[in-house]
Amino acid sequence: MRKPIWVGWFCFVALACGLSAACQAQAISPVVVVDHGPNAPEQLPKPYVILVSLDGFRYDYARRYHAKNLLDLAAQGASAPEGMIPAYPSITFPNHYTLITGLYPEHHGIVANNFFDPVRKEVYDSRDPKSVTDGTWYGGTPLWVLAEQQGMRSASFFWVGSEAAIQGTRPTYYLRFDDKFPNQKRVQQVLAWLELPPPERPHFITLYFSDTDHAGHQYGPDSPQVADAVHELDDEIGRLATGLKGLHLPVDLIVVADHGMAKVEDGPIALDRFGLNTGGFETIVGLSLYPKSEADAQTAYQALRGKSDKFLVYRRAEVPAALHFDRNPRAGDPIILATGPYFIRVSADAQRPQAIPAGAHGYDPNRVPEMRALFVAVGPDIRPGAVVPPFENVNLYPLIAKILGLDITDLKTGPIDGKLGVLGGILQAPHE
């Protein structure tokens, strides 16, 4: 990988003068350009895919809050009316990275937003630039890495892992995460990327918005504030769809969420009040417990087992197979599993009381269906009117790779967990 080059905003005026002029444009928020060279000749005629994430956008929000643009796109293309099933735990970092790698969190290694690695003796912190930009934390082959390895240019307007050199590779175009970056300008940048000359134009683009997640946590999924956030993001999707029509390019637009949102019931529930001795752990990160020894792990398990109907406790190796969360030591041991949308914490700290969110996620989607996420896809490669039942989000990766004509048969990181057959039927020419 060649040395990254910091450049300014790719504005439309600059694009009219070519890429070199865009590199000199006044910065609004810097785009990083990594010189991978132009698209390989065999990639030039292939379609384009934009993968959009609306963080915390529950599967039923579009219908419930009358998100006109999303509903129109669903009618024109494919949708999952009962939602896409997130991987466990149904939280932001694990699921964004699952969407982009086709692997369950225990296989790609990003098992939570924040976690401890007992081998490295280090904490991964989603708020720490040192963690998020260190490619050694991330397993699997993200779609942008796959594309770049095969001579196809990619771009990321925010996504988990996009700032890190994973397998030594970053997207050709990416930005450092800035949640205050205006939504409308995010859409403008994506359209600007697609106006680049064909050799420099990215064929795979990610785009991220967080409004519905923030509103859901603070006010709850049934609030007028969530309705407002849904309408704000629906407007941005409408702007993006309108802009794409004017480009006259073969673009498939896929709009998803990482997880849903549920109204928090009861709480808080403090585990130390049920007999958990926090002194038996090397460290505790959130609800993840990292024991000093096998004996300490078993003691904690016995202390919590059967103590409440609000949670279950498992030794990691005994976590139900359907959750795909029983092998990675980064997950901790034992594992605490809420049985509903309850607010659970390790300790009741009277000196530092923790605010209870109005809405939350992270729960087992099999127990809490409100965890299911949005899925809508539309474009020249998508069959109009296709409706799919709930499906696991690991299956999105092979669908996108198929549309882009990328080979996933011999990944350096091994086979993915997703299967093309799950979503292949929504393609114009179905594939198994």
Image: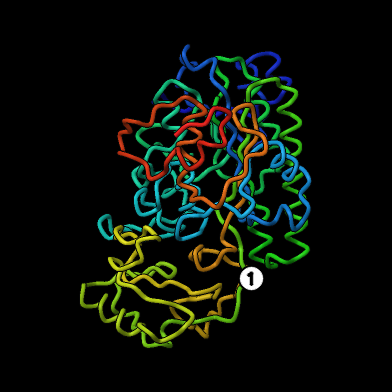
Task: Locate the C terminus and report the quarter of the image it occupies.
Answer: top left
The image position of residue 187, as x and y in percent, is 69, 36
Q: Is residue 328 above or below residue 41?
A: below
* Foreground pick, 417 / 281: 417
Tell me, what colour scheme is on the image? rainbow
171 left or right of 67 in image: left
- Tell me if residue 5 can be seen: no
Q: Residue furthest top?
A: 41
The image position of residue 332, as x and y in percent, is 33, 66
The image position of residue 118, as x and y in percent, is 27, 60
Count of marks, rendered view: 1
432 left or right of 289 in image: right
In terms of image quadrants, where is residue 185?
top right
Residue in the image at 55% along x and 18% along y? 200
Q: Amino acid at mark 1?
A: Lys
Crowding at label 1, few (<14), some or many (≥20) Cα neighbours within 10 Å?
Answer: some
Task: Locate the N terminus and report the quarter of the image it occupies.
Answer: top left
* Foreground pick, 314 / 82: 82
Residue in the image at 50% along x and 59% along y? 90
- Tell me if residue 179 can be seen: yes
* Foreground pick, 285 / 415: 415
The image position of residue 155, as x and y in percent, is 54, 31
Q: Is residue 337 above or below residue 393?
A: below
Q: Which residue is mark 1?
A: 263
Q: Regarding mark 1 in the picture, which secondary structure is present there?
A: strand
